[in-house]
Image (cartoon, rainbow, N blue to C red):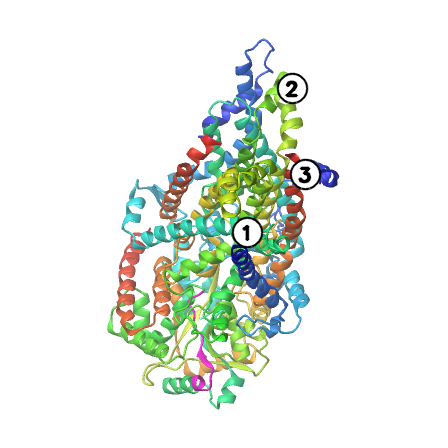
Amino acid sequence: MYRRYGVKRRSLVTAVAAGTPAAIVLASCSQGSSSGGQDAGVVTLNGDRADFTDAYELAGAELEKITGYAIEPRNVPSTENYQQVVRSSLQTSSTTDLVKWWNGYRLQDLARSGGLADLSGQWDSAAEKGWVNPETRDSFSYDGKVYGIPMYKSYWVIFYNRLVFDEVGIAAPTTWDEFEDNNAKLRDAGVTPLFATQEAGWTSSIWFAEILSKLDPQFYTDLTAGEAKYTDATAQEAMRIWAGMYAEGYFTAADVAWDSEPSLLASGEVAQVPMGTWRNGTFAEAGLGEGEYSAFLLPPFDPATAPSVIVESGSISVAEKAPNKEAALETMANWLDPAVQRPWVENIKDTSANPQVTTDDPVLETVLEAVSEQEPTELVRYWEASPPALIEGGVQHLGAFMADPTESNIMPTLENLQSLADDEWARWDAGS
Amino acid sequence: MTLRIIRNVLFYALAVVWALPLYLLVVNALTHAANYGGAPSWVPKGFGFFDNLATAWAESQLGYGMLNSLLYSSASAGIAVLAAGMAGFAVVVMPTKRPTLWFWLIYLGTLLPLQIFLAPLFSSYVSTGMYDTNLGMILIYSAICVPFAFFIVRNYLTTIPPEIPEAAKLDGAGWARMFRSIHLPLIRSSLFAAFIFQFTWVWNDLLFGITLTTSPDRRPVMAALAEIDGGFSSFGPPVVLAAAIVASLPTIVLFLTCQRFFVSSLRAAR
Amino acid sequence: MTLLEKPRAEAGEDRPRPRPGLPLSTRDRLSAIPFLIGAVALVGALLLVPFIATVYQSLTRDNGFTSTFIGFENYLNLLENPTFGRSVLNTLMWTVGTLILPVGVGLLIAVLTNSVPGGRWLKYVFVLPYALSGTATAVIWGFILRSDGALNQAIEFFGGEASTSGWLLSWPTNTIVMIVASTWQATGVTVILFMIGLQAIPKEVVQAGELDGASGPRLFWHIILPQLRPVTVVVIGMSIANSLRVFDLIWLLTKGGPGASSETLAVTMYRQTFILSDYGTGAAVAVVLSVIIVGASWFYLRHQLKRG
């Protein structure tokens, strides 16, 4: 035995011994291609979405024609780590020029650290040109100043598999009763009517927000703003509707993988999926051809209630200490230019925050038509509508409810949520 | 006799339990991403392994990642094992003062939760220009690998009879020569065991990879794979699994070849 | 600690080589420094210094941008936090589970490999999962454990009643099944370590035992097991540290949920720091966790090291 392996062992020892110093020499101090010496002709942009890289470059190519600066995207492929990287680098010179972030309270959280540049001028001039809906200014502002420019505009809709709908003989609902009726028919046909999971954490807020906003849009706004209580009658009512739908067997199991959602919709296992239009492209890639899927706005619970739609839009901000700050501000001033937005939204398959930019994607067209027809009130998504710590704790309670969606679990869940809200609003107001 | 039957049945039953997840891994990696229906399948649906792999390869720049990881894993595990071997020698063989204190000082490194290092390391890496460099990655991985390698080597060194170093000392050998020509050959097998464990650890690390690098040409393989994993990507589990199988091949090969090797060398050393 | 040790080590290196006349012991003591410096410098600069920074951070209120010193407030808040108690309990379950399962199964496999027909080849089935990444392991076990997963499919196939509450959805089932998943991956390394240990047992010892009439379980218990002690110390020492720090699999499978029910201390720390951006509380959990790990390791190794 010894002899047989003797040679091999010696060569391995030599390889390790010789390889180690060689590797150190090889490992020069030079930084990687995306963070090395910065080219003066580009602005750097950091984000957590690897799948946006191509789209950033396309938009950057258009921006370069206007401003002379292209976009050099970087990304951290984990949202949690990305947030930490931004927090630890924003106030140092190592920050990227542009930072992808979220609007609403998440933006305020970042803005009040003083790490972001004031974009009020850029916003106002975009608003003057009609490039952005001026009513959305608040959700990109802190203390009256604008700190972010919308990346896209996603409407929260119900995507559905048309083939399944045709087979069961139903159509997209226009009232809540039709919606419930469809669900019953789908369930009886052996199809899971609705996708719902708490698996990805944040996803447990989706149905709570959808049902509550369709029940009473004003209450939804008040609740997320801290002006109403989770224990109020309207919130209880929303939870009862939700629990009732669970009891009817309309939802998928609470631990279904969120990654599987596109495949489940495409294979017809699940008929309807509540999701932001930013996921539109994913459904197409999961094998749903044109005409095989579409989307509708969930109707109000009571036909007398004003229609509403939850809207989400990421934001891009400029770091106060951006190495190439002038160029970054210039880039943001032109981000909403239709020439830039067209290739951008075409690539990410979502709608633009610039109302002048149209889409030729059939599903998005359907959504935009519904929006212009119903003129729903636009509500800020739950995720961005309250202080981040409240949302992150809140989705845990909602996730626990989804694991046990019973009538008797409603009040404990709402009480937990309210006591969390009391704590977190106090902390937020104290500025910590 | 009955004892033997029970023993065999137990062993085979455990083997089946262990093999089933591996089977599911392979079957679902073979399933074509477009045929994946949202739930795992027990039988392959079409043969899409290479298509899945092609998607993963193109989208995550897996090739770059594997080369980087090869550098990080072999260099860091090499450095760590060398440093651990020397430190183990100092603590066990040499008449060092307070060996227990030195032991805990080094071993402490493997007891701390890794996530706490991320924020301080990120800031200091950025300010020293080590962020997104090969050197930075090799250094942190080496540091993390030292304590456990040290633990293995130290324990192995204690099993070497003290007469051996004493005899060498009488021959007038210096410490350096003694380490090189007597102890290094004796502890070689434990050094290899430590090397393989640490190589595997570095290869499979995701946490430091995504935090301390950002460029595709510096990013280790698991960080590259993270770009196609997770809800925002649309490729689906079959692609992730196909990529994971290929990304694990180097460690599997290392395991299968070296395991046999160090077990027999250990026998020979006795 | 490192800050104190470093200058001493450097001073040692700068010293001229000791003259032959110097007493042997002093010269020998100094000559250990070049051997220690590599390991101590790497661990000290890259791991212990950041840890000291974390200890300080645990005494502050820190949101990632600004920090104010608040003393032990973060620690006091932890005591009142109900999630923290659950988290400690789960961590304890993980530690006990990991000490029993991967260590026990690993020892069993290593011992039986040579006597079971085909065992030499079947052992690779136990070793292979160790080479897989955490992500791949989590995807596979997600496949198995979710409500629509392979386990429930198999239960229904054989005519059983699939668990309606979901394997990952209720405590303590979710923690237990994740310990099983972790065992699947972690057993490979214990198998290898125990096999190294078994190979190192001198043949004469076993033969002498056999001559004395020991066989089967008795031979194993009285002759083989004591000989495995050095490697057992490594395996158990490693298991203590790894089980207390367990994070990846939980984060990828349940994110500590539903409703924090499967959180361990490492997950709680990660949530506080990365999700809630409460860096002070996260650091306090980190310090508590570190103290527990160091304490447990010290408690176990204190005697083992002396005997070794």
User: At x 55% / y 48%, what residue is drawn?
Assistant: C111
Answer with left or right where residue A348 lies relative to residue B265: left
- Tell me which amino acid carries mark 3: Val
Towards the viewer: B253 or A385: B253
3D distance between C-alphas at marks 3 and 1: 31 Å
Q: Position of residue B224 (x, y in %)?
A: 60, 56
Q: Is residue B112 above or below residue B232?
A: above
Q: Is residue A31 above or below residue A269?
A: above
For the question of whether residue B209 can be seen, the reply is no
Answer with left or right where residue C101 lies relative to residue B53: left
Q: Tell me which segment is drawn in magenta.
A: A186-199
The chain letter under disc 2 is B
For the question of whether residue A141 can be seen, the reply is yes
The disc at residue B173 is 2
Towards the viewer: A171 or C131: C131
Q: Nearer the viewer, mark 3 or mark 2?
A: 2
